[in-house]
Image (spheres, rainbow, N blue to C red):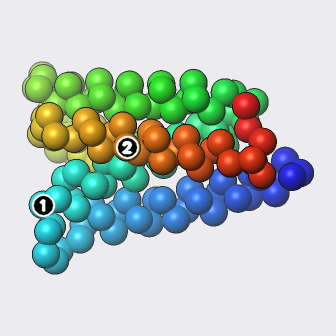
Amino acid sequence: MPEKRIRNKIRVELFITFLLGFALKYYPGPARELLNNSLAGIAYVIFWCLLFQLIFPQSNALKIIVIVTLITCLLEFAQLWHPPLLNLLRSAWLGKILLGTTFNWTDFPYYFLGGFIAWLLLKRPELDIK
């Protein structure tokens, strides 16, 4: 598949994941806690994996997925730390979305599931990504 077509496919998946992530994060209905605080983590990891694969198309997809998942886990642990600068960043909407505010052990399986789904998306034969 030509590279332009591959990149366009990743862009569409990136856009869909972005919308899905915000829909999960701000869903107001039943099971809100699960969707807002846990399942949104799946979309978060997928989004960053797709974005970095788009920016660095020659990079190994598995390497990107491992790095994104590890950084996401480190950001989760960083939520245990509350220095003034991080608290200031987290007080803004973007900081809250990117850095999170509350540590939760149960988020880790969702991050790994997001990495696995990203791997499935990026390892499709038609994408031919390393």
Q: Indicate the position of residue 19 as horizontal and vertical percent values.
A: 44, 66
Numbered tag placed on residue 61 in the rendering? none
Q: Residue furthest bottom?
A: 29
Numbered tag placed on residue 113 in the rendering? 2
Q: Residue furthest right?
A: 2
Q: Relative to the observer, which residue lies in front, 125 or 83?
A: 125
Left or right, 103 with respect to 124, comes to left
Q: Residues within 10 Å of mark 1 (few under 14, many from 20)?
A: some
Left or right, 53 with respect to 46, comes to right
Q: Relative to the observer, which residue lies in front, 99 or 9?
A: 9
Give the position of the C terminus as an image quadrant: top right
Q: Indicate the position of residue 69 as horizontal and vertical percent values.
A: 40, 31
Mark nearest the camera among 2 and 1 is: 2
Which residue is at a point 14% across and 34% down the rendered structure image? 105
Inter-mark Cα distance, 2 to 1 = 18 Å
Kind of residue at badge 1: Glu
Marker count (numbered): 2
Is there any visible trace of residue 94 in the rendered image? no
Q: Earlier in the sequence, mark 2 or mark 1?
A: 1
Which residue is at a point 62% across and 33% down the rendered structure image? 61
Left or right, 47 with respect to 108, comes to right
Kind of residue at badge 2: Leu
Is there any visible trace of residue 37 in the rendered image? yes
Q: Indicate the position of residue 49 as horizontal and vertical percent values.
A: 53, 40
The quarter holding residue 96 reads top left
Q: Which residue is mark 1?
A: 33
Which residue is at a point 45% across and 39% down the rendered structure image? 115
Secondary structure found at label 1: helix
Q: Are marks 2 and 1 in contact (CB under 8 Å)?
A: no
Q: Residues within 10 Å of mark 2 (few under 14, many from 20)?
A: some
